[in-house]
Amino acid sequence: MSKGREERTQKPVMSELPGLAAFATMGTTIALCEAVGVLLGLWADHSFGTGPTFLIIGVVLGTVMAVMSVIKQVRRYL
């Protein structure tokens, strides 16, 4: 009887790995999109001598890119 319980407790852990990988991919995607937006905004502000104008634009564009990427990733599982 205990052997059956051990098998049942180990199977869900292995089946959850693809889900965990998907969440890790989404988190990485969000971080990279935001980082690219911030870095491009900082570079543009430094190049043109403006205030945080391009930084704000970069954050907004990074957020839009992140949301679009996550939506595309989530649609695979729906």
Image (spheres, grey):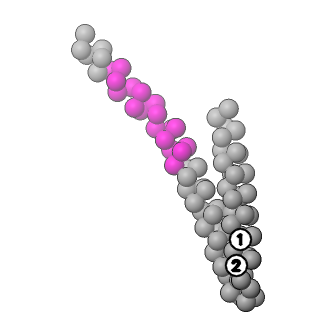
Check residue 56 in the rendering and tell me which mark sits there, or answer none.
1
What is the span of residues highlighted in magenta in the rendered image?
A: 7-24
Q: Quadrant of residue 12?
A: top left
Identify the element where label 1 is drawn: helix
Q: Quadrant of residue 57?
A: bottom right
Instruction: Give the residue at the far left of this rendering.
Output: 2
Vertical comparison of 62 with 72: above or below: below
**Mark 1 neighbour class, 10 Å CA radius: few under 14, some 14 to 19, many 20 or more:** some
- Left or right of 53? Residue 12 is left
Is 44 magenta? The answer is: no
Which amino acid type corresponds to the residue marked 1 in the rendered image? Answer: Ile
Residue placed at 60% from the left, 62% from the top?
32
So how many labels did they put on this image? 2
Gap between marks 1 and 2 measured at Cα: 6 Å
Vertical comparison of 29 with 10: above or below: below
What percent of the width, then of the height, locates residue 38?
64, 71
Q: Nearer the viewer, residue 49 or 9?
A: 49
Q: Nearer the viewer, residue 10 or 31?
A: 31
Disc 1 to disc 2: CB gap under 8 Å: yes
Query: Mark 2 = which residue?
Result: 52
